[in-house]
Image: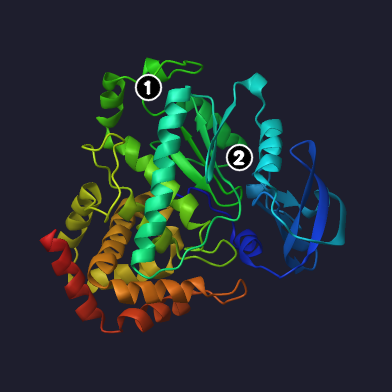
Amino acid sequence: MVRYRLPLLVLALAFSLKTASALEYVRFMHNGKEQTEEGRVTLEERREFGFEARDGQFYTFVANLPESVRGKTNVISIEALITRSRDDAPFVPYTKAETLERLKAEFPAREGYHFLDIPPFIVIYTTSNAFANWHGNLLRRVHEQYVEHWKRLGVELTPPEFPLVVIMLSSDARYRQYAQQEGVNLFPEQRAYYHKLTNRIVMYDMSGQQAFREGNQQRINQNDRQNFLSNPNNIMTVVHEAVHLVGFNTGMHPRHTPNPHWLYEGLAVVHEVPDLRHPSGWSPGRPHVNRPRLDQLRRYLDRSPPELAIQRIQKMLQDDGLFTAQATALDNYALAWGVSYYLVRERDKEFAAYLKVLQEKTPLSKDNAEIRLKEFENAFGNDWNAFENGFRNFIRRQ
């Protein structure tokens, strides 16, 4: 779940790229600390600009920053800018060694942070070594399988430009404190999130097992594993966020361009399905039916005649806000899963072509409700009665 929403002004800054070959240097104050970053300008408009650092993080510098977003991570008042300069050096991401050096300064050992290198991921953790290794390897398998699955369907993906950073904290309390410091408003039941601006996953030790307590070095035994796997939501959470991180860093959802919320959430819930027969709780291969989402979707369709279902699908394609409002989130996550799963299983070639259209958008491509609906209709036709009938019948057969 991408649980981070900013005003449209800030989002526009984050997603509007202006090609720049020169390396830019910015020094600014944020939350009482001076910070310096090297990177490339992604937007230049009056006294507002967007910036991508060499570690892959986005920063947005905004004039007259709204009070509602003051203090949020990587959202900076333009008045806090101290200096800004540039030279002729090209933009090049930090090496992994340079990235690790910066991360170790941000997450010092004296505060209990450890590091694990499982390419393409860097895992920062305050859990046990066992927990971090187990889930680091699960993340790696998800990345490999995700790329391989979409390659088979004809969707071209690229290697990540930056190391994929995952932060695993030892307790729910520490996790919620960290989210609060980032200015992220969590749902009560939310146990992980992907932050679009920092380009990081944040999660915590969801097992609650004493064997995983902070600083514990003992191995995971079979009982520990079974206790953790007995709740499939644990695996679903890890895989869901991993799919977000991988999707936004392999070109499935280019980070510099507008991305429909339904699509990146839909693909995450398609891939999140656990397999408790597998030692890791998740198995590679073709995605399975997501039973909790299926049950939720069937309940929605049972109370929704075709006309209403068509309207809801169209609105889901157009309105990202449906996924951040608690009153509509569950039905829309189920609907996003259903539409995505239907297209993957029944209309895969058309779906691959639709994804390619979105991948080829430029950062300055226009994005609005009318354009989104038209793009979908160009791929799957504008006979919505036929689409809804095929979709509904497919869901009934699952």
- Residue hosting label 2: 182
Q: CA distance from mark 2 to mark 1?
A: 24 Å
The picture places residue 213, in percent across and down from the top left corner, at: 44, 17
Q: Is residue 397 left or right of residue 338?
A: left
Q: Is residue 230 above or below residue 140?
A: above
**Camera sees residue 265:** no
Q: Is residue 253 left or right of residue 362?
A: left
Closer to viewer: mark 2 or mark 1: 1
In the depicted view, which residue is nearer to us: 160 or 381?
Answer: 160
- Residue hosting label 1: 208
Task: Give the number of marks.
Answer: 2
Locate the C terminus by quadrant.
Answer: bottom left
In the depicted view, which residue is nearer to us: 15 or 108?
Answer: 108
Query: Residue at left 28%, top 47%?
Result: 273
The part of the image, by quadrant, that contains residue 8 is: bottom right
Query: Residue at left 82%, top 53%?
Result: 25
Query: Residue at left 23%, top 37%?
Result: 276
Element at badge 1?
Answer: loop
